Image: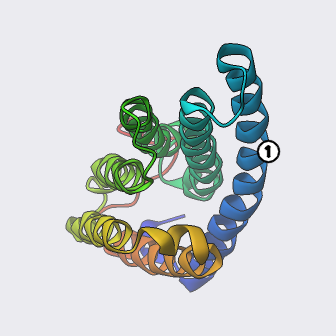
Amino acid sequence: MSSHRINWIFGLLWWLVSMGAIFVGGFVALCISWFAAGQLGIAIEGTNEGPVGSVVFLALMSLLLTAAVGAAQGWLLKQYLPIAHWFGATLAGGAIGAVITGGVGLSGDFSLDLPSAATWAGTAIAQWFLLRRFSARSIVWLIAGVVQILLVLNQPNLMILNPPIIILIYSIVTAILIVWILRGSSRSIKLTDPQV
C-alpha cells in the first residue's frame, strides 16, 4: 500500500487499537505489576506497601503498558516499518520511565509526575526518530509529545483520576497525527523496502 493511500479508516483503526491496547494492556499491566510488586515487597521488606513494592509496581506498569501499546500500534504500521522498530521505540519510553521511577522512588519520593513525563518524553522522541524518515511533518509528533509532557506535569492527577478521558484524547490526537504524517510521505514505503 502506498503511503499516499493512507486514509481515515487507518486513523479510525489506530484510534481503536490504541484505546484497546491502553485499556486491556493497562488492566493486564496493573494485575501483573500489583502481584509482582506485592510479592517482592513482602519478600524483601515484609510489606507490600514499602518503597521496593512501590518502585517495582510503577516501573513494571510503565514497561508493560508501553509494550502493549507499542505492539498494537506497530501491528498497524507493519506496512511501513517492521513491528519490532515501533515496538522498540515505544518500549524505550517505558524503559526511561521505569529507570526514573526507580531512581525517584528509591529516594523516597513516589510522585508520578517525573516518571510519567519521562515516559511521554522518551516515547515521543524515539517514535519521532522513526517517523521523521517518512515526512517532514513528523515534527508535529514531537511537538505533541512535548505538549503531553506539560499536561502531565501540570495536571498529574488528571492521569490518575480521569484515565478514560486522557486515553480518548491521546488516541484521537495520535490517530490524526499518524494519518497526516503518513499522507505527507515523500515516498512509497513497503515492508520489503531494504531501507526500512
Along the horizontal axis of the image, is 177 left or right of 32? left
- Looking at the picture, how far across and down is residue 76, in whole percent? 61, 59
SS for callout 1: helix
Q: To which quarter of the image does residue 112 belong? A: bottom left
- Looking at the picture, how far across and down is residue 52, in whole percent? 57, 27
Quadrant where the image shows the N terminus: bottom right
**Residue name at image x 46 percent, y 72 percent:** 174
How many numbered discs sit on the rendered protein? 1
Badge 1: few (under 14), some or many (20 or more) residues near its Cα, within 10 Å?
some
**Residue name at image x 36 percent, y 31 percent:** 107
Q: Is residue 69 above or below residue 32?
A: below
**Residue name at image x 38 percent, y 78 percent:** 180
- Looking at the picture, how far across and down is residue 129, in whole percent? 28, 48
Along the horizontal axis of the image, is 190 left or right of 32? left
Along the horizontal axis of the image, is 17 left or right of 120? right
Q: To which quarter of the image does residue 97 belong? A: top left
- Taking depth in this image into account, of 23 and 114 the one nearest to the observer is 114
User: Residue lying farthest front?
Assistant: 46
- Taking depth in this image into account, of 11 and 59 the one nearest to the observer is 59
Quadrant where the image shows the C terminus: top left
Q: Is residue 118 above or below residue 56?
A: below
Dot 1 corresponds to which residue?
Answer: 31
**Residue name at image x 24 percent, y 69 percent:** 143
Residue type at mark 1 is Cys
Q: How is the image coloured?
A: rainbow
- Taking depth in this image into account, of 144 and 75 the one nearest to the observer is 144
